[in-house]
Image (cartoon, rainbow, N blue to C red):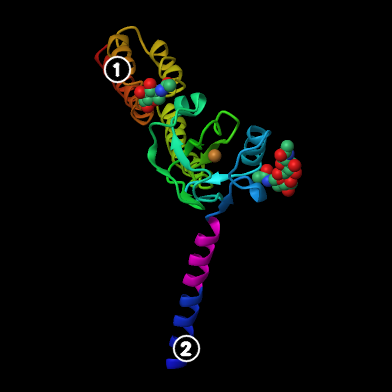
Amino acid sequence: MAGRIDAAIGCMFLLSVAILLQTSLAQTTHVVGGSIGWTVSADSAVVYTNWSSNQTFLVGDTLVFNFVTGTHDVGEVSKAAYDSCNGTTFIGSLITTGPASIVIKTAGVHYYICTFGMHCSYGQHLMINVKSTATPPTATPPASPPVATPPTTIVAPISPPTTSPPPSPTVSPPSPSTTASPPPLTSDSPSSLPPPPPKSASSVSVAGFSATVFSIIVAFLF
Ligand SMILES: *[C@@H]1O[C@H](CO)[C@@H](O)[C@H](O)[C@H]1NC(C)=O
Ligand SMILES: *[C@@H]1O[C@H](CO)[C@@H](O)[C@H](O)[C@H]1NC(C)=O
Ligand SMILES: *[C@@H]1O[C@H](CO)[C@@H](O)[C@H](O)[C@H]1NC(C)=O
Ligand SMILES: [Cu+2]
């Protein structure tokens, strides 16, 4: 028994380790600019635009800006500051020590620039579009609504048959067939009773029976 419990605990431990490993692997480390790193050159703008377009950024991922301390720096800025290469205000703080690792904490577009000289204007800036990690679970909601709707649609078809008109035509013919004197009584009862079919059926026989009794009484009196 103890061996089985140990095996079960071992399996659970391995499973949790696998989950932790998968979670850690899901967080990608992106080395900005690849082997070129975080620097400035004639085609810097093309390099970083091309590099970012080839990456999928998710919340929790890490950006690594490779540069030698004192030659460049990196700071996250607003879109306006990115467009004008304005390095006075930052989201977070300006990082002056290289290499710099930045963990992406929110989804959306993020902007980074270097504040050294004209580096940003020459193209040492980076724009990335970060996606939320919670995208896969979307196919579950449609399954439950279809199950809930059928009962309501089934209820509706059942109610019409109970209030169906057919019983009333069968009720009306008997009244003309009866004698001239009873009609007022028989005509009143069918008109008030049509909605419930079972009662109207019985009322026809009752009306027929009362008409027969009435005719017998009339015949007996005369
Ligand atoms: C663009 O990126 C691809 C793959 O990431 C690379 O092969 C290519 O050299 C890059 N082009 C430029 C101009 O950096
Ligand atoms: C990046 O480019 C390489 C080829 O240079 C390609 O194999 C890879 O799938 C691309 N990745 C993305 C996320 O576009
Ligand atoms: C840079 O941005 C700051 C606010 O963040 C603003 O006060 C300043 O005027 C801007 N400088 C230029 C040259 O646009
Ligand atoms: Cu720089």
Residue drawn at 29 percent across, 13 percent down: 188
- Which quadrant of the figure contains the C terminus? top left
Q: Which mark is residue 192?
A: 1
* Main secondary structure along the magenta-highlighted residues: helix
- Residue 151, given in percent of the width and then of the height, sits at 44, 39
Q: Nearer the viewer, residue 112 or 147?
A: 112
- Residue 193 placement: quadrant: top left
Residue that label 2 marks: 4
Residue for point 46% across, 36% down: 154
Give the magenta range. 15-26
Q: Earlier in the sequence, mark 1 or mark 2?
A: 2
Specify whether residue 190 is painted magenta: no
Distance from mark 2 CB to nearest ligand 2 atom below 8 Å: no
**Residue visible at 43% across and 42% down in the picture:** 106
Q: The disc labelled 2 sits on which kind of residue?
A: Arg
**Residue 158 percent across, percent down from the top left:** 44, 33
Q: Where is residue 189? Give x, y as percent.
A: 29, 17
Q: Label 2: state its secondary structure.
A: helix
User: Would you place residue 4 above or below residue 178 in this image?
Assistant: below
Q: Quadrant of residue 121?
A: top right
Label 1 secondary element? helix
Q: CA distance from mark 1 to mark 2?
A: 77 Å
Residue type (three-letter) at the residue carrying disc 1: Ser
Label 2 crowd bin: few (<14), some (14–19), many (20+), radius 10 Å: few
Residue 60 visible: no
